Image (spheres, rainbow, N blue to C red):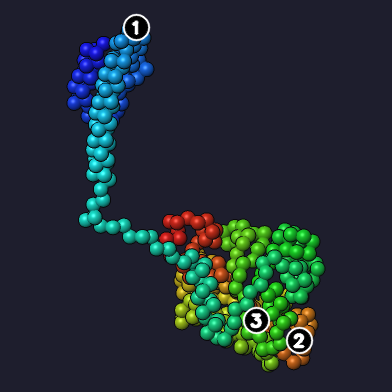
Amino acid sequence: MQEQLNQIEADALASLKNVENLADLESLRIKYFGRKGAFTALMKGMGALSQEERPIVGKHANTVRTRLTDAFDRLAETLARQERQQKLALEKIDITLPGRRPTIGKKHPVTQSLERIQVIFRGMGFQVAEGPEIEHEYYNFDALNTPQDHPARDLHDTLYITDSQLLRTHTSPVQVRVMEKQQPPVRIIVPGKAYRRDYDISHTPMFHQVEGLLVDYRVTFSELKGVLHSFARQMFGEGTRVRFRPHFFPFTEPSAEVDISCTVCGGKGCRTCSWTGWLEILGAGSVDPNVFSYVNYDPNQVTGFAFGMGVDRIAMLRFGIPDLRLLFENDMRFLRQF
């Protein structure tokens, strides 16, 4: 049996010289030391030896096992080191290659337009005010002189949360909240989100508005026209023309819709302006005296004007965007253009 052990050792050591990877080494280990391996099978015959032979053969078997195990372990360590070096060589970074520039984000066209609007009106002395998007019916309609039977209060136009709470349909309620806490003069703009039941090429359920309010002693409609003329020229260019058309809003009287000369054709007429040469951008008017009665202002002492514009529409006109819905679809191909 000792000769057989010596033969197994010699064969195993010879086989180790031909091993090239860890997988082959593991297969060789199983061949000799697995459950059915040559060394394991030989050890099962130890029981047939005499009592005198058993300790001698056992000692020799342990010596052979130790020498082979050490040889296997040394080769395993060598092969593992070689595989790590090969892997590192394949994963080596070529620092001579040009680097990839990090992608730099840009502001959304609505954000760009909103910031530009605020800069313009801050330059004219207006302060920015904010208010809740979930609004009480009193502030959204009642205090703005909107009667109970007005179509804007119907379910098909307004998103109600409860019978008296709703998602604000404009940012005008903030004007009432500010006037409740502040005595004239008041000169504010109110940027923010508003909500209505609309979804088409020029309307979305959520949209951005900027409302403006100026209340003081002896404020005239002419001053409103001056403010909006200045805004239009700063926003769309010095050559922009402005016109006012009579209109109706519950909380202003007189009221007007404000148009600018078409930003595409310069007022000559094109498909964008329906060949009229004009584009509507906002509504405005003198504050209705009834609104002052809700905030304890004396309409005989103070006057004012208000205006409101859709920021999303302003962005469409500034950047030539044909469909309002493109602003909110998060298509990176579209947004990267800005």
The picture quadrant where one finds residue 209 is: bottom right
Front position in the image: 93 or 57: 57
Tell which residue pokes out farthest to the front in this image.
52
Q: Which label number is shown at residue 48? A: 1
Q: Which residue position is annotated with label 3?
A: 213
The image shows residue 121 at horizontal and vertical percentages of: 55, 81
* Identity, as a three-letter code, of the amino acid under mark 2: Tyr
Disc 3 and disc 1 in contact, CB within 8 angstroms? no
Q: Quadrant where the C terminus lies? A: bottom left
Q: At x 57% / y 75%, what residue is drawn?
A: 259
| Of marks 3 and 1, the one in the foreground | 1
The image shows residue 336 at horizontal and vertical percentages of: 42, 61
Depicted 310 relative to depicted 159: above or below:
below
Q: Disc 3 on helix, strand or loop?
A: strand
The image shows residue 184 at horizontal and vertical percentages of: 69, 88
Disc 1 and disc 2 in contact, CB within 8 angstroms? no
Q: Which residue position is annotated with label 2?
A: 297
